[in-house]
Image: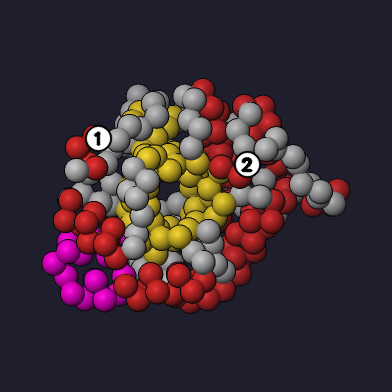
Amino acid sequence: MIPVQPDVPPEHRACGKCKTAQPLDFEFAFAYQPIVDVKARTIFAHEALVRGPNGEGAWSVLSRVTDENRYQFDQACRVQAIKGAAELGIREHLSINFLPNAVYQPAACIQSTFAAAREYGFPIERIIFEVTEGEKVQDRPHLVNIFREYHRFGFCTAIDDFGAGYAGLDLLSEYQPDIIKLDMGLVRGIDTSKAKQAIVKGVLAICSELDIRVLAEGIETRAERDFLSDAGVSLMQGYLFGKPAFRAAGVVDPAAWD
């Protein structure tokens, strides 16, 4: 699918931030971590994870994001993530974290994303937008509106860290995304925790009713993988399968399938 700019009324095609944004005064790059489908034994997607220009940890970059440059950073992340994925030849889905507090008007703030998708030939239906980990959502109705607009434009949407912080059942009752990502706190050691098993099985039942796919993140052991697979989770992410690859497409450790 060739990316097509949405039909946006002129009054919503720009806002003050778009016109006054200044270039960032720091650099960053991306690492890409594979998200696998254990049933199909294939890579389903790659998550773009921000890093310093020389591979430094995410905090070296995120600590420099302020209220003043949040919009510029969010926009630059979208463009660089898409550009990097296209240059690396990634053909699977691309998961991009976004900052809801940096989106003022969804239809206006998505324009650079459409432009990047067109320029680099990356199909918009293969882009997944998820709220970045640790981002404090100040206005839930605004977040729900962003998700709905992005879905209307043709993007996939995901609620990250489900079961922690803002990402709970109350948010799910307001908006049903394509994917929810189980928080790693629920995943870690689930094979030996009856409480976690009961909670996750309940979430799976709800998502089945709502036609939402469930992705388990933070998988580190075969026991976690096997329990979740037996429970019906096919999408997984974690060091068991592959670590983030700096400026490269993540690959899956063949031993992770065994």
Number of residues whose C-alpha sits closer than 10 Å to that of mark 1, classed few (under 14), some (14–19) or many (20 or more): few
Q: Position of residue 251 (x, y in %)?
A: 33, 32
Q: Residue at x 25, y 51 (%)?
A: 219
* Front position in the image: 119 or 24: 119
Above or below, 113 relative to 107: above
According to the image, label 1 marks what residue? 253
The stretch drawn in magenta includes residue 191 = yes
* Front position in the image: 2 or 231: 231
In magenta, the rendered stretch is 183-200
Quarter occupied by residue 194: bottom left
According to the image, label 2 marks what residue? 124
In this orientation, does residue 146 appear?
no
Q: Which residue type does callout 1 highlight? A: Asp
Which color scheme does this rendered protein use? secondary structure
In this orientation, does residue 162 appear?
yes
Q: Position of residue 138 (x, y in %)?
A: 53, 65
Residue 153's tag is none
Q: Is residue 61 left or right of residue 146?
A: left
